[in-house]
Image (cartoon, rainbow, N blue to C red):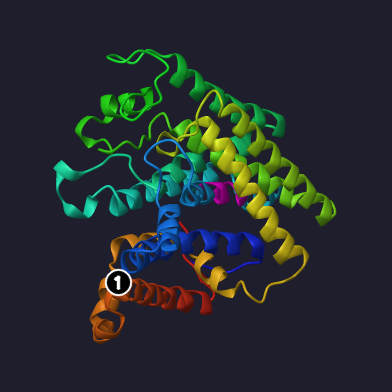
Amino acid sequence: MVKQKDRLDSIDALRGFDMLMIIVADQFFYYLDAGAGTNFTGFLANQFSHPEWYGFHFYDIIMPLFLFLVGVVIPFSLESRLKSGELSHKTLYIHILRRFFILFILGWVVQGNLLAFDLGSFKIFSNTLQAIAIGYVFSTMAYMHLSKGKRYVFFVACLVIYIILLEFVFVPGYGKGFIEPDKNLAIYMDRLIFGRFDDGFQYTWLLSSFGFIATTLSGLFAGEFVKQNIKVEKRLKNLIVYGGLLLITGLILNLIHPFVKKIWTSTFVLVTSGICSLALALFFWIIDIKKQKGWIFPLKVIGSNAIVAYVLSHIINFSGIADQLLFGLKQFFEDYYESVTVLGGFAILYALLWYLYKNNTLIKI
């Protein structure tokens, strides 16, 4: 545990917004629609789910934003340490690898069924935290050992290599160029390497790591724009231009190589990284330039301990705990009661995060 240091408020707020979408919004809108059944609530519930394959919903930006923000903070956390010699490279390597293994283990706890103690249900690679672990390691190493220009080359290489693999490598039983459910190289490789311990769904992870790395690198580049030693207005402009270029490039390339969230295609990386950059630009402009900070406190409480919030929300049934406390309200809310328990469960989790924040405590991985 470490005490809070000076942090860029817009990053914490945006991370808090992202976590808010993950830990409460998706369930809330699902149960709200189950109770109301209107076209409007149906639209909201649909936007907080993933499309079957092709297409794009609001919820598709949430996981990429998590990875993107991990990349954003890399220049802030490493630059001064590397320049001052505060830590040796050996010490940094130990820290990086330690974080990698902790994230991977937490991924097993959250979604790899580690706590089931059942080898038959165990998944090797199947969680957002594990995608973050991959992106973090490679992006950090790139920041430490590659020049800025070579980092951009590395980013492009990840995207191009993944496109070539998906488009031109022969998949036994199907051929080449298939980017369809259960008919693509990414899922073939997952099943080949992980066997019965693969994800078990249409999501892919091994070859998709090219995309995870690229998404985290895109955040690293955005962090460098925000951290530039120039006027804040110029930094904001650079960030907007950067995000716009990524988004436009991704939309154009989508015409020949579709963006698919479930296998994290290169065009998906470009489109979502562009949106993430523009979202960061918006938060940076409102919070750190215009100094409009009165509304961000709840988001900072969540964002300051984002991984804690993510893990706890997945391993503890806070809605179930709320149900034990709020069961008397069921007679009043009827079809909307599940929505109430979701909000009640979030309130309990938020109270825990608020206690950590109030005591200036960040739990770092």
Res 287 → quadrant: bottom right
The C terminus - image quarter = bottom left
Residue positioned 50% across, 23% down in the render: 163
- The residue indicated by pointer 1 is 338
Nearest the viewer among 106 and 86 is 106
Residue positioned 16% across, 51% down in the render: 117
Nearest the viewer among 335 and 144 is 335
Above or below for 173 versus 53: above
Q: Position of residue 139 (x, y in %)?
A: 56, 39
Residue positioned 41% across, 65% down in the render: 24
Q: Is residue 210 left or right of residue 174?
A: right
Magenta: main secondary structure equals: helix
Q: Is residue 287 left or right of residue 305?
A: right
Above or below for 251 versus 121: above
Residue 325 appears in the rendering: no
In the rendered structure, which amino acid carries the disc numbered 1? Glu
Total labels: the figure holds: 1
* Mark 1 burial class by Cα count in 10 Å: few <14, some 14-19, many 20+: many
Above or below for 187 versus 245: above
* Outermost residue toward the front in this view: 39
Q: Position of residue 148 (x, y in %)?
A: 70, 34
Q: Position of residue 1 (x, y in %)?
A: 47, 66
Q: Position of residue 201 (x, y in %)?
A: 28, 38
Q: Which type of secondary structure does the marked residue at label 1 adopt?
A: helix
Look at the image and give the residue range highlighted in magenta.
67-75
Q: Is residue 58 magenta?
A: no
